[in-house]
Amino acid sequence: MGGIVVPGESSRVSASIPVGAPGKHQGYLTVPHSRNDSAWGSIQIPITSIANGEGPTLLFTGGSHGDEYEGQIALLKAARWLQPEMIQGRVILLPSLNHPAVLSASRLSPIDGLNMNRAFPGRRSGTPTEMIAHYVYHQLLPLADVVVDLHSGGKTLEFVPSVIMHDLPDRELHAKTLAALQAFGAPAAAILTELDSEGMLDTAVESLGKIFISTELGGAGMTTATTVRIAEQGVRNLLTHFGVLRDDEVASSQPGLTLHTPEAGCFLVSHDAGILEMLVELGDRVVPGQPVCQIHHFQEHDREPAVYEATASGILWCRHVPGLIGRGDCMAVIACDYEL
Amino acid sequence: MGGIVVPGESSRVSASIPVGAPGKHQGYLTVPHSRNDSAWGSIQIPITSIANGEGPTLLFTGGSHGDEYEGQIALLKAARWLQPEMIQGRVILLPSLNHPAVLSASRLSPIDGLNMNRAFPGRRSGTPTEMIAHYVYHQLLPLADVVVDLHSGGKTLEFVPSVIMHDLPDRELHAKTLAALQAFGAPAAAILTELDSEGMLDTAVESLGKIFISTELGGAGMTTATTVRIAEQGVRNLLTHFGVLRDDEVASSQPGLTLHTPEAGCFLVSHDAGILEMLVELGDRVVPGQPVCQIHHFQEHDREPAVYEATASGILWCRHVPGLIGRGDCMAVIACDYEL
Amino acid sequence: MGGIVVPGESSRVSASIPVGAPGKHQGYLTVPHSRNDSAWGSIQIPITSIANGEGPTLLFTGGSHGDEYEGQIALLKAARWLQPEMIQGRVILLPSLNHPAVLSASRLSPIDGLNMNRAFPGRRSGTPTEMIAHYVYHQLLPLADVVVDLHSGGKTLEFVPSVIMHDLPDRELHAKTLAALQAFGAPAAAILTELDSEGMLDTAVESLGKIFISTELGGAGMTTATTVRIAEQGVRNLLTHFGVLRDDEVASSQPGLTLHTPEAGCFLVSHDAGILEMLVELGDRVVPGQPVCQIHHFQEHDREPAVYEATASGILWCRHVPGLIGRGDCMAVIACDYEL
Amino acid sequence: MGGIVVPGESSRVSASIPVGAPGKHQGYLTVPHSRNDSAWGSIQIPITSIANGEGPTLLFTGGSHGDEYEGQIALLKAARWLQPEMIQGRVILLPSLNHPAVLSASRLSPIDGLNMNRAFPGRRSGTPTEMIAHYVYHQLLPLADVVVDLHSGGKTLEFVPSVIMHDLPDRELHAKTLAALQAFGAPAAAILTELDSEGMLDTAVESLGKIFISTELGGAGMTTATTVRIAEQGVRNLLTHFGVLRDDEVASSQPGLTLHTPEAGCFLVSHDAGILEMLVELGDRVVPGQPVCQIHHFQEHDREPAVYEATASGILWCRHVPGLIGRGDCMAVIACDYEL
Amino acid sequence: MGGIVVPGESSRVSASIPVGAPGKHQGYLTVPHSRNDSAWGSIQIPITSIANGEGPTLLFTGGSHGDEYEGQIALLKAARWLQPEMIQGRVILLPSLNHPAVLSASRLSPIDGLNMNRAFPGRRSGTPTEMIAHYVYHQLLPLADVVVDLHSGGKTLEFVPSVIMHDLPDRELHAKTLAALQAFGAPAAAILTELDSEGMLDTAVESLGKIFISTELGGAGMTTATTVRIAEQGVRNLLTHFGVLRDDEVASSQPGLTLHTPEAGCFLVSHDAGILEMLVELGDRVVPGQPVCQIHHFQEHDREPAVYEATASGILWCRHVPGLIGRGDCMAVIACDYEL
Amino acid sequence: MGGIVVPGESSRVSASIPVGAPGKHQGYLTVPHSRNDSAWGSIQIPITSIANGEGPTLLFTGGSHGDEYEGQIALLKAARWLQPEMIQGRVILLPSLNHPAVLSASRLSPIDGLNMNRAFPGRRSGTPTEMIAHYVYHQLLPLADVVVDLHSGGKTLEFVPSVIMHDLPDRELHAKTLAALQAFGAPAAAILTELDSEGMLDTAVESLGKIFISTELGGAGMTTATTVRIAEQGVRNLLTHFGVLRDDEVASSQPGLTLHTPEAGCFLVSHDAGILEMLVELGDRVVPGQPVCQIHHFQEHDREPAVYEATASGILWCRHVPGLIGRGDCMAVIACDYEL
């Protein structure tokens, strides 16, 4: 971002409920969308707002990428069980932030091809993805103290289930965020330095001095009973951590692993196209020089596969999912141990 | 099939190598395919033939569905390491039987939309999938004593890794096949009764009185180091079991589980469309009445999810992978214990 | 058809309800359909069966073409209000016969591109449209005494709302069908001679010696309150006419118009491509030589439009809907008066 | 618009005729458009200019949305019959303003997906739709005193045929526009307050202090003899009203209805997806609480339809056309009586 | 073909003119084609018939593949200049036999994906391509003594302009065809042995004992003034040769080259994918071992290109056109000298 | 460009090699590209850098349009044979500048639909085409003294093989560029005045006061042995001309033709759609009034073709390739003699 945009601008997106008002309200954000098959059509994004008494405001988003489901399920469930009388403060839930992408089960919006998490702070009269980003930035972020954006690996990546924050220059904000990270209760916690953070919701929130927590829970375009449970418990743990929910069943525990990705060499990128064979399992420890995966040139079946070795020491934190891989695709990420 | 087709008819598909001849030969099956972007184009399917001395002929196929990879990888590797001097008999390897489907990473052929495993015995002047089936049926099956067709769950299903045979009316064939099934060395073995076996390679081979072994190894359109290892070891074990390979490192072990799917109720089919949440993990035991999964109506976010319960007692053997599910999709298969 | 197929063959389509059994049953026909996005997927077609006591069996179908809605709405409503105790006999309701076409709001099936009403008597192991036709022909027609197939103009045609029968060589069948035609209560009734009746449900039913009634109600891919009312009343009138329903509110009246299309000249076919301008309204009377429509060559804007004149005397019974028209499209049908 | 753009900038679009010069000129606007199938291709938009003596300049546009035909036909005809000697002043005719959209019979341009009527004032080096808007804004609007943009409902909406103006803050401009509105001679006249007028041609013209008249004539992607006649007569009436045409056959009459849409509740928006059944006819009067339409959940055929009631008192002025409707689509607009 | 089909069966295709009747008639073949965008649509294929007095009947077809233009242009021109009084006998002209393919500028029909020249003898109730083939086979071939099917290289092949016949077992037919071949007047004449002649118009005509002449004139999806002139002169020469036209300007000359392709090695097929570089020009002489072309692996830019050498001695008669080439594509055909 | 952008801004594109550093380096430019089928994917564009001692820097680009191959082949070959010890100075080679367009064999990028040669100076956070342009402008142009951009006609145009420069206002730069133009050694040399040079690489380089040379070599989406030889020799000749390569085999010769296109009338643009027939060959001389081509209305086969005549005197320098042509397409360019 070439300078911070001050949030608060009016939006072409409208809410059917009084977001943040006392009580429980369920409705839709309406994004105008004239189409060939509906001249006066619109996109309706489910939103739930629950408020009671005094306390901080937590904004939870899922479905920023349409093919990531743990967050969507956990927030759809929270939107049913959370009641005003259980809380002190405000909870705003957007289970399917990029609703068109969710409907098409794709990472990017099928309408404008945009990546929601590179579209912030958005544009008032832009494409649907940009209009949604603009609404969140200008109308919701001013209400929020804490933003939790629940991601997973989607159809093409798979992760050791992890809660994530960034290494923040503002040390006070860093400390508060770190406390929330530990409270989430995921098996692993990662402190990342984004190589290219332009346009992310993360960056937008952090530059406003607010707490931002993200996750990478599973992947392969699916969920398991285990990964959904991590997401649900994480939502409950954060609500409790910030004093919004009085929860006697706190299940939060320190993460078993704390990780980071300090070097570009942590990311293994393919220079071949073919069938990917992983040689280690997700979560396995690897050392430099150890073969991590190989690519079979299946059309030239007398050619030797291309072998890729680890250049860092750590665990296989993330892997490419599809059986076919192309040149330039990320095959694997090795995450290194990080002393908190 | 409305009557057995006698194999042996001439084919429009041609092989660039003398399939079954002594020695090791690697080349292509050529399927003529006139296209808008290549008037005199063709499809080239990799094939390897290795023969030496006396012994049975084993035909191995992978990539019958393009998005199933364990078989493809195991056979690409076998095509490199297997040498004539190691064997007595013949091995024919087709790692990517439906090559156009493999190239597009899809279950069905992108050219004709056909399912290779419902296209047997094929048609001489049919579409590419039908021409391939016709070639296999008329030119390769007459050479083979044993056919091994390596399947996995593909992009939309995931299985407890299993080796598979059918309950065969010919009890002698059944016994020989059962011995091979046990030799394969997979974690689970399943004896299935297909509901709808018309057009399958399985049916085509079995009706010729030959041994047929199949698998379902993993899924989600990916592989893991573990599932590839099961496929590689299974290929090696079968070669040894039939006396083709003299292998000192035999790793075969009895399957940990023997299963079948005796009732239609083993298959849970969705009557809802939405986000699928599995409530049990693959391989977990379930009892009748236990909730197995639920579907969230994410657009009507105030509606309760639809819960589906098990109607049989057994383990969760197979599940739907994608986060979104539609009406009529198979959500889960419960397999019951089977006494061999 | 090159000879009558005798119905009764087993089908790959299965019903979740006992079709034709006493009582009211609502469920689905399941058509197996393996897809890239659901390996073990199926198509679920809603079906309702209501039976009580003795009486004839009426089979009603809507959605044979996916973009025709009056029949779909009338049958969805009938499936709710009809109860066993109201009737003597059996009523089978298929509001969306070609369910995939209904889902895509298109005339033809998006899966196989086929026209349901040219697919009879179907194929057991054919494409989905052919499998549905096969099921109807082999499993439902044997149960039925009367078949009523509710059509409309769809997205590209619009009709004077009409009930339709064919001129039948079997004069007894003709008389019974004519009585039903008059009982339906539509504004117009047409007795057609199909130019090309191969593959139609009409032909399949009539050749079995059963009564067949069809309709063309409105069009433009939409409905109006009036055209839905005609369909609903027609269903009720036929049930009453055949003694299945005891209805005190019989609203049947003689059709205001009786029509036929005796000559090829009744069909005006375009030899131009451009913007269609109709010069008369649907239902207007025209005489030979009268301009009926003209086509504007909008890209060559200094060229005179091509004018098309009526060659028969009658009313404008049917017209092309879309503003653009291509060479070979039917622009209009002039129906002539017919003395019953 | 964030401030008025001053028209007059040079354009990449060029005209093959001297627009506005004395005499009658017919030719093309050429929009450069490099394509994969024509490296040095362009779009040619028909334009006619007729000028004679002194008098105001009227610019008429049709085909701003490609699936709206009354304006296109009326202007194609006017481009043939209008001759310089008939007029005093200038007439500029663009029957297919968004020519690519007209060629594909779609509301939006198939090239860039843009809505021509949200693209003003355009961009010099933008996409084709933006380049056309830029040319109109910078090269044609400076010539015009009055702009008439002829719209219809297109494929997805249908209207009571109406001539339209906006409630204008400049009361003198309002009065002049109102006089033109009444002169047009449509069955209904509507004075609208646009909710979202950014990017409209309307807004661009009105902010320049010029007279702007629009229409909504019919819809369903078709025309009728009646709606074309309204458009043709309206063009002739306006030419006469402004003194450009000396017409003895003036057929103008006061509109039978004068309407407006004062509240958001005039617009009924769907929260369901299914088959739409309108319960009242276009032009019918409705009162608050009266059911206007219902949506059938045709896949869940035992579920009750969702009924939508009027919240305002007035007439059904506009309705959704297609049989299927989605969440967020506008189902109906109730227009209220307006005292001129 | 598994046995000759006897032509004469009735067709669903109809002609708007009396084909073969005395005089000149220009009209259309109408192929019924119900589409989503025109329920009662059809395909209209231009046909011209000219007949006068006694003499043989010549049937000329162009556009069998939609991207081959010399034949289309020559026959469109012949349809204008040929008049009954110029001829003795009958001439039937079909410039765009596979009209849908011509409209989409593609080799195959965009409707059914079929290759017209592999669809004979067609099917009465098949797809459009099959219905056209069926009409030609059953309705036109019985009228014809000589069939001339004008082909070119299309978008993906380029040829030394040649007239073509097959080596025919019936020596009398062979001799008559050879005389016509020499009369055509092309720069080169080729006597081919088709590897795979099933479904070709050639085979259909020859098996009826009639004379069949084909061509391959240029290619690259374009024409030149020279190649069009060869086609036009060839049509005129054949009409003169068979005594239908009395032409004083006979320009026929013996072909400069007579060629054949006796071995499979004449066809160079690619086993690589990449950018094709031809090392010799079309018409150049090559000897065995001489490099003919090479394929650059442009994505692996440090890899040596794959070089392909001639295996036969002759001239480069045909080459692949597009810059990119895939595995299995024909790169080049070497034609050998043939002593007539 | 509304003012020169000063190059040097940081880029989101990264190089895997030290571009311009001494020695020979082959690697990739990596353009980040998140896709639905690879969340963390990227585009890898081959780049080679060779540097030694003192001397100027020449940047060569091919594949700016993906369907133009002479430059791609010549630069792929140069990247193999050029070694540091052969040169004095630096050579940077980008054989496939718009790599996604090269992969899809299309003029424009299949990802964003953009024309690389209208995308300069690019955008840092734009689409892939814009990011590539931005990298070239900001990171490579500062290194270069001379830029050579090798174009051909692509799939839809064909040229007399020519080397090209623009008429430059800076006479010193003009003179230096003219010397390079003559050194290239192409059959023809053209000095063009671009009508619309906004966004071209040409304009970007020239406004920085650097030497820019372009070409148009052949076309029809193919190459010939001859046109590839012209490209290869031209690269070698320019390296020698600028003293980078010490080449004893200098083959440069004065161009046979020197041309320009002084009037808009040099460009013949179609106002018809149909089949294009060229009446003269590429390179033929034409005079005003001479028919150059005609368009056949093949669907209205009784309509006369539209004939287009030359309006300038010169040679047919460029022609439309595809057999079908649309309204607004450039059919031909007549280039006039130019006295150097």
Image (spheres, coloured by chain):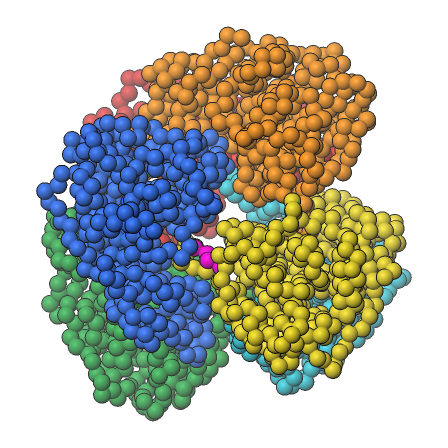
Chain colours: A orange, B red, C cyan, D yellow, E green, F blue
In this picture, is C111 found above or below B278? below
Q: Nearer the viewer, residue F157 or F223?
A: F157
Q: Position of residue B225 (x, y in %)?
A: 41, 22
Asked where in the image residue A290 lies, by quadrant, the reply is top left
Residue B185 makes an appearance in the image: no
Asked where in the image residue D21 lies, by quadrant, the reply is bottom right
The verdict on residue D34 being magenta is: yes
In this picture, is B6 found above or below B23? below
Q: Nearer the viewer, residue E271 or F92?
A: F92
Extreme residue in the top direction:
A339
Number of numbered discs on residues: 0
Q: Position of residue E95 (x, y in %)?
A: 38, 73
In this picture, is A286 found above or below E22? above
* Residue that appears at 34% across and 51% down: F169
Asked where in the image residue C38 lies, by quadrant, the reply is top right
Q: Position of residue E331 (x, y in %)?
A: 25, 52
Quarter of the image with the C terminus of chain E is bottom left
* Residue that appears at 78% across and 49% down: D268
The verdict on residue E51 being magenta is: no
Q: Position of residue E314 (x, y in %)?
A: 13, 58
Residue E72 makes an appearance in the image: yes
Q: Nearer the viewer, residue A57 or E138?
A: A57
Q: Main secondary structure of the magenta part?
A: loop
Q: What is the span of residues highlighted in magenta in the rendered image? A: D31-35
Quarter of the image with the N terminus of chain E is bottom left
Q: Is residue E159 left or right of residue A72?
A: left
Q: Is residue F35 left or right of residue B241?
A: right
Q: Is residue C174 left or right of residue B201?
A: right
* Residue that appears at 44% across and 70% down: F272
* Residue that appears at 11% across and 67% down: E339
